[in-house]
Image: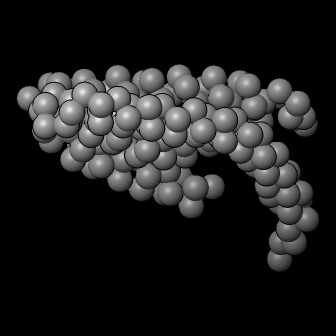
Amino acid sequence: MSIINFIIFVLFVTYAVFAWNSTKEFENTIIRFSYILVGTIFITVLNLILFGISKIGVVYPKKEMIGEVRRIILLVFIPINGFIILTQASNIFVQAKSGLVSKEDMQKKIKRFAIIFLVLIVFEAIYFKNIQNGIIDFIQNVQINKRFVITY
């Protein structure tokens, strides 16, 4: 599990750097920090909802596994979704605020972003179900292998 924790740490550090750099056009540091914080909370809630939906039909051998699987999925997908959603949203916001892009082009960008967002949600809801089954199998295999370790 330490490899998974290391990967999660790297994802979050990279996410923080990307989010901070994508908001460099914002007025001040408080607005940048607020945008990243609110965006991360939004993504977390979205991932919790997607996990709840995708959990339907998944059979957990032990109720305690639900929390561990949810933790792993959330901690991996919060930064991944942040890369996709927050960086694109901040780019659209900056372009709209600058006024360099016409209203029609901005509407096209917003529609394209909304379509990508919806496809991402549908894809992740399906993918979360597969991930849950994979993590359950992985945890069960690790537990079985621990029972059969020969000590000298």
- Tally the marks: 0
For image coordinates 43% across by 24% down, the residue present is: 41
Residue 115 position in % (x across, y down): 52, 35
Q: Is residue 147 left or right of residue 64?
A: right
The percent coordinates of residue 13 (x first, y second) are 35, 50
Give the quarter of the figure containing the N terminus: bottom right
Residue 26 shows in this picture: no
Q: Quadrant of residue 40?
A: top left
Residue 23 appears at what percent x and percent y?
Answer: 21, 38
> How far across and how far down the image is residue 6, in percent?
49, 57
Residue at 36% across / 47% down in the picture? 15
Seen in the picture, residue 45 relative to 1 is either above or below; the reply is above
Using the rendered image of the protein, determine whether residue 22 is visible from the camera's viewpoint: yes
Which residue is more in the foreground, 137 or 2?
Answer: 137
Residue 39 found in image quarter: top left
Give the colour scheme shown: one colour
Is 151 on the left-hand or right-hand side of 14? right
Quadrant containing the C terminus is bottom right
Residue located farthest toward the left when viewing the structure as drawn: 27
Which residue is at the far bottom?
Answer: 152
Q: Residue at x 55, y 46 (%)?
A: 76
Residue 97: which quarter of the image? top left
- The residue lying at 25 percent from left, 24 percent from top is 34
